[in-house]
Every structure is written in C-alpha cells, then in structure tokens.
Image (cartoon, rainbow, N blue to C red):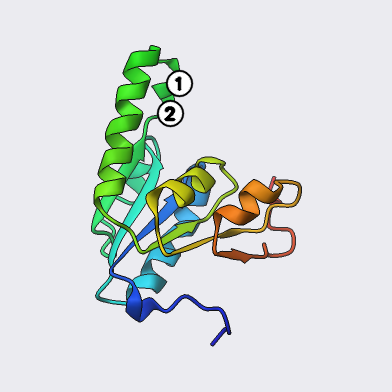
Amino acid sequence: MLKDAVALNEIARALVVVLRHHGDVLLASPVLSVLRAHAPRIELDALVYDDTAPMLEGHPALTHLHVVGRNWKKAGALSRLSLEKHLFSALRARRYDLLVHLTEQPRGAWLARSLGARASVAPVVPGRGAFWARSFTHLYPRAPNGRRRAS
C-alpha cells in the first residue's frame, strides 16, 4: 500500500471527473470498476460531458451520472449561469469525501476546492502552477507517453 494512499474505508461518496472526449471516458470506465471492487460500499458518481454520458449510462459501479453540456458556453449568460448553478448544487448536495479528477481540465481544480472533499486526486500537469497543485491532496504522475494518440 502507498504511504499516502486514500483510506477507502473512510469514504462514503466519491466523484470521478472525466471531462474529455469519448476515448478518455471509455478508458476511465475501469477506474469506476476498480473503485467499486476495492470499496463496494462507496456511492460512486461520475461527471462527464453530455455527449459522452451514454458511454457510462448503466455502468454497474455508478450511483449517479452528472453531465456538463458542451453547448452551455453558447447559451446566454443567464441561462449558462442557471445550468452551472444547478449542476454545482447537485454536486454539492452529494457531499463527496473523494474527488478523482482524471484529466487536466481546469474545472476539476475548481471542483476540488469548492466541493470540500477530504481527499482529491489528479494528475501532475507540468506548467499548470501552484493553483493546480494546491487544489488536490494527491497528485499522480502520468504514464510515459500518456498524451500520445494512435494515428
């Protein structure tokens, strides 16, 4: 066991954030399964973009699937604010103990800071700065060539 591993036996609810494209969401599916296998009593939620949500709908490890609309940016300011507020309220109401952010999307840092999870995990992102690093309790290194895509 890692010396700074998150104590899963102390976690009641966890949120896995995967705000990326279809392939990234597909590759995140095993993370949900592994968390469920190691901590079967945890209520496990995910946050993804609306166009990738079908990839996780019905996943046996999930309790709730939250979505961010990719087109929210095109909505008027008041409409977007309302959508964002509704999403944030739904996430905040779940009272997460653990946030696992699997991408370098900045929203994850803001969520880690604002949702109040006791533990938050994200990748090391070179050049992202102190705000990113201090937003999470645990940072993990990326696999070598982790940003490489097949052609």
Vertical order, 7 against 22 (above or below): below
Q: Residue at x 34, y 80 (%)?
A: 9
Residue topped by disc 1: 73
Name the one closer to the observer, 24 or 142: 142
* Quadrant of the image containing the N terminus: bottom right
State which mark lies toward you, 1 or 2.
1
Disc marking residue 26: none
Q: Residue at x 56, y 79 (%)?
A: 4
Residue topped by disc 2: 70
Name the one closer to the observer, 72 or 114: 114
**Relative image position of residue 51 (x, y in whole percent):** 39, 35
Q: How far separated are the C-alphas under marks 1 and 2?
A: 7 Å
SS at badge 2: helix
SS at badge 1: helix
Amino acid type for the residue under numbered disc 1:
Lys
As drawn, is 129 to the left or to the right of 11?
A: right
Query: In which image quadrant can residue 72 be found?
Result: top left
As drawn, is 36 to the left or to the right of 130?
A: left
Does the rendering let one see residue 38?
no
- The residue sitting at the top extreme is 76
**Relative image position of residue 104 (x, y in whole percent):** 60, 47
Amino acid type for the residue under numbered disc 2:
Arg
Does the rendering let one see residue 49?
yes
As drawn, is 4 to the left or to the right of 144?
A: left
Q: Residue at x 36, y 64 (%)?
A: 97
* Residues at circles 1 and 2 in contact by the CB criterion of under 8 Å: yes
